[in-house]
Image (cartoon, rainbow, N blue to C red):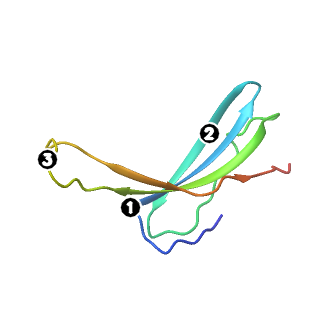
Amino acid sequence: MTWTSDEDPDEFVVTLSWVLGVAATSARTEVAGSVREATIPTAPVPAGATDLHISIFAYRDGVFTGAAQPDSRMRVRVDSDQHDLMLIP
């Protein structure tokens, strides 16, 4: 899959999620923030899975100003719209 972004975050995470019975699960692929495409393996999706969706998340490390613990970390996430999928055997 491919996408567009005006910014280069630290990384993108592409998540494929599905439901099997009453359990929801997902598989994720991480790529560098300069990349605009990823191959999402569908092998982990079991037969009979429903509600397949794909989402893209952009992550950037945040910066604290003012009083903060020296080992404090912040991770900022921006997500895309969720897109429905259908696997064709």
Query: Residue extending furthest top?
Result: 22
- Disc 2 element: strand
Q: As drawn, is 84 to the left or to the right of 41?
A: right
Q: CA distance from mark 1 to mark 3?
A: 25 Å
Q: As drawn, is 45 to the left or to the right of 26?
A: right
* First of labels 1, 3 by sequence position: 1
Q: Amino acid at mark 1?
A: Asp
Local crowd at mark 2 within 10 Å, few (<14), some, or many (≥20)?
A: some
Q: Which residue is mark 1?
A: 10
Q: Amino acid at mark 2?
A: Ser
Residue drawn 85% across the image and 51% down it: 88
- The location of residue 6, given as percent across then percent down, is 49, 75
Residue drawn 39% across the image and 53% down it: 76
- Disc 1 element: loop
Q: CA distance from mark 3 to mark 2?
A: 37 Å
- The location of residue 77, given as percent across then percent down, is 45, 53
Instruction: Give the number of the disc on residue 26.
Output: 2
Q: Quadrant of residue 8?
A: bottom left
- The location of residue 31, given as percent across then percent down, is 48, 59
Q: As drawn, is 63 to the left or to the right of 11?
A: left
User: Does residue 79 sit above or below 35 in this rendering?
Assistant: above
Q: Can residue 41 be seen from the camera position used here?
A: no
Q: Which residue is mark 3?
A: 67
Q: CA distance from mark 2 to mark 1?
A: 22 Å
Q: As drawn, is 6 to the left or to the right of 20?
A: left
